[in-house]
Amino acid sequence: MRRRVIQPDFVHAVGGDLRARLEDHPNPAYVDHVWITMQAGSAERILVSINTQSKRNRDAGFDDRIRVGIVRGTWIHQPARGISSWPGFDYAKAERGANVFYEHYERTDLENLLLRAAARAVLLEVWGAPYHSKRHPGIHQIHSRRASCAVPEDVRGQDGALRFYYGEEQQTELMLFKFCGQP
């Protein structure tokens, strides 16, 4: 009898040895993710999948760009590598503690921002929903889960985010991602 593994709904992961690249797809119109793999303490690398445009908004006639808010900070101690179930992450709480300005990014500009951040970072902290790809366990839904122009479901407290840790001057960048119509 095969044992069923139950995945948590939301996870937090921290890893290093980052490798970033654009999503593979034979049709360039379907490339809408940056993939970052990281070593989070287990033998298997974790695949982090970040949207760089919204196909659902585009197909419904809305703005397909992603809005990105970046909260800059510094670190004294890096969090421990690993992956664990997490109760949630809420943009509203993160925004209360900082003056977050969201800027629209075209797909290629957001790809470049993420690729540069991953190349500079010594560590990545991720909040999101777990999934399993053909090659790696993964984390996706790395964006606000509030209702948007094309998605009526309003999920609260399960927002996905990235925090990059840079070696130079011990800086961090917490990146928050929103689609058209999200508060």
Image (cartoon, grey):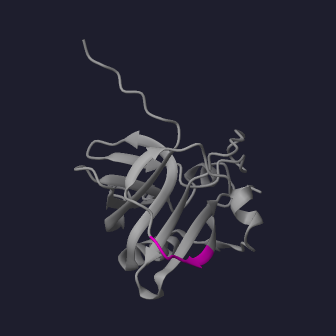
Residue 65 can be seen in this image: no
Q: Position of residue 68 (x, y in %)?
A: 62, 69
Does the magenta-highlighted stretch encompass residue 73?
yes
Q: Closest to the observer: 23 or 132?
A: 132
Does the magenta-highlighted stretch encompass residue 157?
no
Residue 6 relative to residue 147: left or right: left
Residue at 33% of width from left, 43% of height from top? 133
Quick one: which residue is furthest to the bottom in this view?
169
Quick one: which residue is furthest to the top in this view?
1
Image label count: 0
Residue at 47% of width from left, 88% of height from top? 169
From this view, report whether residue 170 is shown above or below residue 88: below
Quick one: which residue is furthest to the left in this view?
43
Say which quadrant the N terminus sits in. top left
Residue at 49% of width from left, 76% of height from top? 76
From this view, report whether residue 38 is shown above or below residue 107: above
Q: Position of residue 17 (x, y in %)?
A: 29, 67
Residue 12 can be seen in this image: yes
Residue bounds of the magenta highlight:
71-77
